[in-house]
Amino acid sequence: MDKVLSVLKNSKILGIVGAILLIIGNFFSFATVKMFWVEESVSFIEGDGVFVLILGILALLIIFIDFILSKIPEGKLKFLFKLRNQKIVLIPAIISAIILFVDGSEAFEYGSAGLGFYLLLIGVIALVVYPFLYKGDK
């Protein structure tokens, strides 16, 4: 267990997994509604999932900001260097969590959660935990 925590603290694996789950969770069944012998599943991308998809891509870009900045010549786009702090990934994670819980509370009044909801939930949790565990690459 110590080795797993050591790897998570010294790498960006948790953040990458969280962002990828936030991206792909949009395409799976978010909720299933059953009414009058008819069962209908809805993916999140059909609603607010577009925003969560964009936030997932933004989180992935923030996680890889060091790599992106290494490709930019010095003196150009200086404002991007302020984004090196990995705690900025909390912004898209919290916005995604708010969207997820607002839409989830509406959808689950009449149905049940699908695989997409759980993937999005795990992705949000991973992105919220990631900046507090990450200590930098060795």
Image (cartoon, grey):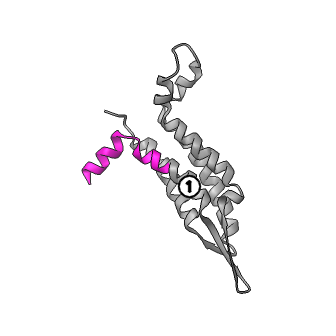
Q: Within 10 angstroms of label 1, few (less than 14), some, or many (20 or more) residues?
A: some
Where is residue 51 drawn, in percent x and y? 67, 48
Q: Amino acid at mark 1?
A: Ile
User: In this view, which residue lies farthest toward the bottom?
Assistant: 37
Res. 90 image quadrant:
top right
Q: Which residue is mark 1?
A: 24
Where is residue 34 drawn, in percent x and y? 68, 80
Residue 13 lies within the magenta run: yes
Which residue is pictured at 49% across the width and 58% down the height? 122
Q: Is 35 rendered above or below residue 78?
A: below
Quick one: 122 or 24, which is closer to the camera?
A: 24
Identify the magenta region: 1-18
Residue 38 lies within the magenta run: no
User: In this view, which residue lies farthest toward the right?
Assistant: 36
Query: Could you tell me what secondary structure mostly forms the magenta stretch?
Result: helix
Q: Is residue 30 left or right of residue 16?
A: right
